[in-house]
Structure formats: structure tokens, C-alpha cells
Image: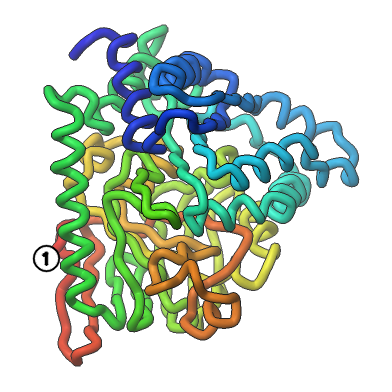
């Protein structure tokens, strides 16, 4: 299984070489919690070893964020530092590489915060950093989201484990999910990526017109435009360079025609919204493409507030399919981190769509995106709705039908 230091190096190299596909003289920005420092150091060392021109690190801290929400004036909650805005603008300009690490130090840190105050911070960031979100969704830079273990998150995932071993236990799970323990890590990832691409190719060949989800609490229909494209196993920049937006990745996904979404759907895993707000038992209702009903546990008010940001926030921008063979699902764990939980179950996303999921999507104007039902928004919120009890059938553009998923597996 190797030592922790050895596994961490392999993991960092995976993020650098397959995640952002780092090349000599490229600039790297890493955004991480202070608690992620060991992985950040491994990433920085690995990046310089490859030949990065410079590695810049922006550390965040949940406890400072909590203090701000407790004591800052309402007017000051809308502040987004100009230095951060300038750094991200420069990153897009030079086509740099962006790594975002997830993994909460304390998943309950924002318990009890007024929903309007937390949503004010989230909305301000979404508005002022929208240029960067657009650049990311249009693949105008190489980017990767990956996870790190923290003691607080590990304690949430493994409530029965006590002492200093709990964080080590989570690292072991992360390394396993990311295939770090395989004898030949690159070969294992090549095989996995090829499998995802085969599923995407098969779905593209079928020319799906509508997806129909059925399961406990779920009866949802989602239409696709005739030019929709299924993706899986990685993405390409606008200049044709491959990268891996998420590590791990277990999904094949596309953009729906948001105007066609109708029905009810029940969430099957918790949503850890904005890396800080936990919402259980989400239930949604759509009519003529718009979210008309939203319920859930504590935290749902914060989500409701953020969904007021723009019209597109209450429409669908992504549908993604995940098999129950995913190592995230087979672990039997809830990770309280969307990066992992979305790779355990099929999901949908409220908010912006990825233009790569429509033919020539990156070249479309906003008017043309509206014409094909490609959603636009300042948010993108993944919500897990899949399980072995949820079946997915398809109506095809040739008039036929096809069973897409059954018992948690692709049915072709």
C-alpha cells in the first residue's frame, strides 16, 4: 500500500499530470484551506519538479469565514478582495492552471448562521467572480477540483472512529477512490477513462431526446436538444489540450434543454452546499423547465436565497449518470463533500450548463444558447438523485426507446 508520504506524492502527481496536465513554464494557482497544507506542499514541489513557472497559493480558513458572518456589518458582507479578482483575471489571461482543493475542516462551522447573511456572501462572490466561472465552464484554462482529508470531515464520515486514526482512515479512502493503490496508477486511470468515454460514445450514438427518471419520490422528465453531446473521462481546453476537471471522476454528463424539465425528484444523498451548508432530504418540483417547489432540512433557506441570484439558478444545467460500481458508492460512505458524493450517484445540477455539452457550444452567443435551451447562471449546484432504486429510460430522436440505467448500472 506504500507509505503516506509516498501515496501523497503519487496523488499530487495525478492531480498535476492528469488533472491540470501541467507543462513546463505554466503558472499554477492553488486555492485551499489552511488545513490542506501537506497536500499543497506536495503539489507545489511536484509542480516545480515538472517545470512550473510559478506556483501561487491562496489559503482560506473556515473559522475566519465564520467570524466574518458573526460580526461583519451587512454592507461589508459584499466585499470581494480586489487582489483575488485581479489574480483570477490574470490566470484567465495567461491561460494558467487552477487547482481547487475541497475538504472541510469543520462541516458544522456555519451551523446557526442567518441564511440571508450567508447567502449575501455567496451571492457577492458569484456576481464579482462570474467572469472566472464563465472561463472555467468554457474551458479557457486547465482546472481541477480534488479533495483533501481533514480531521473534522473524517470525524463526520466515521463517527465511530476515535483518536488520531480518523484522518488517516479518510486519506486511505481518498487514495483508494483515486486508484492510488493500483500497481500501475496510470494504466488503471487509462482503463477507467476509456470506459467512461465508451459510455459517452454509446449515448451519443443513441441520440437521446428525453430521459425519464423513476424511483421512490421521483418521476422526472428531462429533454435534450438534438445537438447535445455526452462527455466523460475528461475535457479539452478551447485550444485542444486534455485535462481532468475532477479527481475522482465517475460520471458521464450532458446539458439538458432546460425548457423541457418537468416532474418531481427526491435527493438521494446529502448536499454540502457551498462547502459549508449541509442540506438533507432535498425534494424538488419542476414545471416547464422551472423549479417551482424546493424542500429539505435545515440549510434549505440558504439555498433558496442563493437561487434568487438570477433566473437561470432555478433551471437545470447538467444531467450526469453514475454507476453503482463507482468506488465512491461501493465504499458505502457519505462524504459530505459534493466532489465525492456526486461521483457516487447520478445527479442533476441547478444553474449554468457546460457549453462543451452542445455542438459548437463555446462559440454560441447568449441568444443562441437560449435558443437551444443551454442554461446560463452564476451558480452551478449539483444535487444527487440516483440510486440502484432509480431507473432511467430514454426516448430517442429516431422514435425508439431505450433503457439507459437499471439497478444502478448502464443497461447497454
Give the quadrant of the N terminus: top left
Picture residue at 30% right of the left edge, 66% below the top: 230
Q: Between residues 315 and 144, which one lies in front from this camera angle?
A: 144
* Vertical comparison of 97 with 123: above or below: above
Q: Between residues 92 and 205, which one lies in front from this camera angle?
A: 92
| Quadrant in which residue 27 is drawn | top right
Picture residue at 36% right of the left edge, 10% below the top: 165
Q: Where is residue 25 in the image (x, y as percent from the top left)?
A: 48, 29
Q: Where is residue 132 in the image (x, y as percent from the top left)?
A: 62, 50
Picture residue at 35% right of the left edge, 69% below the top: 218
Q: Where is residue 111 in the image (x, y as percent from the top left)?
A: 64, 36
Give the quadrant of the C terminus: bottom left
| SS for dot 1 | loop
Position of 70 compared to 294: left or right?
Answer: right
| Quadrant in which residue 85 is drawn | top right
Q: Name the residue under label 1.
A: 411
Can the viewer see residue 24 in this picture?
yes
Q: Where is residue 84 in the image (x, y as percent from the top left)?
A: 72, 37
Amino acid at each position: 500500500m506504500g507509505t503516506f508520504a509516498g501515496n501523497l506524492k503519487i496523488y499530487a502527481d495525478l492531480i498535476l499530470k492528469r488533472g491540470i496536465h501541467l507543462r513546463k513554464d505554466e503558472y499554477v494557482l492553488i486555492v485551499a484551506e489552511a488545513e490542506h497544507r501537506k497536500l499543497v506542499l506536495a503539489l507545489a514541489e511536484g509542480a516545480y519538479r515538472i517545470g512550473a513557472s510559478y506556483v501561487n497559493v491562496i489559503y482560506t480558513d473556515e473559522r475566519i469565514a465564520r467570524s466574518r458572518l458573526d460580526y461583519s456589518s451587512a454592507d461589508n458582507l459584499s466585499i470581494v478582495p480586489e487582489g483575488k479578482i485581479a489574480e483570477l483575471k490574470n490566470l484567465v489571461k495567461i491561460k494558467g492552471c487552477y487547482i481547487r482543493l475541497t475538504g472541510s475542516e469543520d462541516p458544522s462551522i456555519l451551523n446557526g448562521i442567518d441564511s440571508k447573511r450567508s447567502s449575501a456572501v455567496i451571492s457577492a462572490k458569484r456576481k464579482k467572480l462570474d467572469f472566472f466561472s464563465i472561463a472555467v465552464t468554457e474551458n479557457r484554462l486547465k482546472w481541477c477540483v480534488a479533495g483533501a482529508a481533514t480531521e473534522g470531515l473524517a470525524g463526520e464520515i466515521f463517527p465511530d472512529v476515535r483518536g488520531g486514526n480518523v484522518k488517516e482512515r479518510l486519506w486511505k479512502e481518498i487514495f483508494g477512490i483515486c486508484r492510488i493503490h493500483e500497481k500501475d496508477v496510470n494504466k488503471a486511470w487509462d482503463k477507467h477513462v476509456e470506459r467512461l468515454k465508451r459510455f459517452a460514445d454509446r449515448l451519443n450514438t443513441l441520440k437521446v431526446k428525453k430521459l425519464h427518471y423513476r424511483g421512490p419520490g421521483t418521476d422526472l422528465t428531462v429533454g435534450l436538444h438534438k445537438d447535445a453531446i455526452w462527455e466523460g473521462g475528461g475535457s479539452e481546453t478551447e485550444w485542444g489540450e486534455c485535462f481532468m476537471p475532477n479527481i475522482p471522476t465517475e460520471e458521464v454528463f450532458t446539458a439538458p434543454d432546460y425548457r423541457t424539465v418537468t416532474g418531481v425528484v427526491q435527493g438521494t444523498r446529502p448536499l454540502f452546499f457551498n462547502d459549508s451548508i449541509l442540506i438533507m432530504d432535498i425534494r424538488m418540483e419542476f414545471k416547464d423547465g422551472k423549479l417551482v417547489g424546493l424542500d429539505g432540512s435545515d440549510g434549505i433557506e440558504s439555498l433558496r436565497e442563493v437561487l434568487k441570484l438570477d433566473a437561470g439558478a432555478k433551471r437545470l444545467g447538467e444531467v450526469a449518470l453514475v454507476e453503482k460500481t463507482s468506488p465512491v458508492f461501493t465504499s458505502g460512505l457519505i462524504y459530505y463533500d459534493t466532489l465525492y458524493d456526486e461521483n457516487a450517484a447520478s445527479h442533476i445540477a441547478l444553474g449554468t450548463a457546460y457549453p462543451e455539452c452542445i455542438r459548437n457550444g463555446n462559440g454560441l452567443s447568449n441568444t443562441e444558447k437560449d435558443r437551444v435551451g443551454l442554461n446560463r447562471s452564476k451558480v452551478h449546484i449539483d444535487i444527487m438523485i440516483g440510486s440502484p432504486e432509480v431507473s432511467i429510460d430514454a426516448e430517442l430522436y429516431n422514435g425508439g426507446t431505450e433503457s439507459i440505467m437499471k439497478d444502478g448500472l448502464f443497461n447497454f
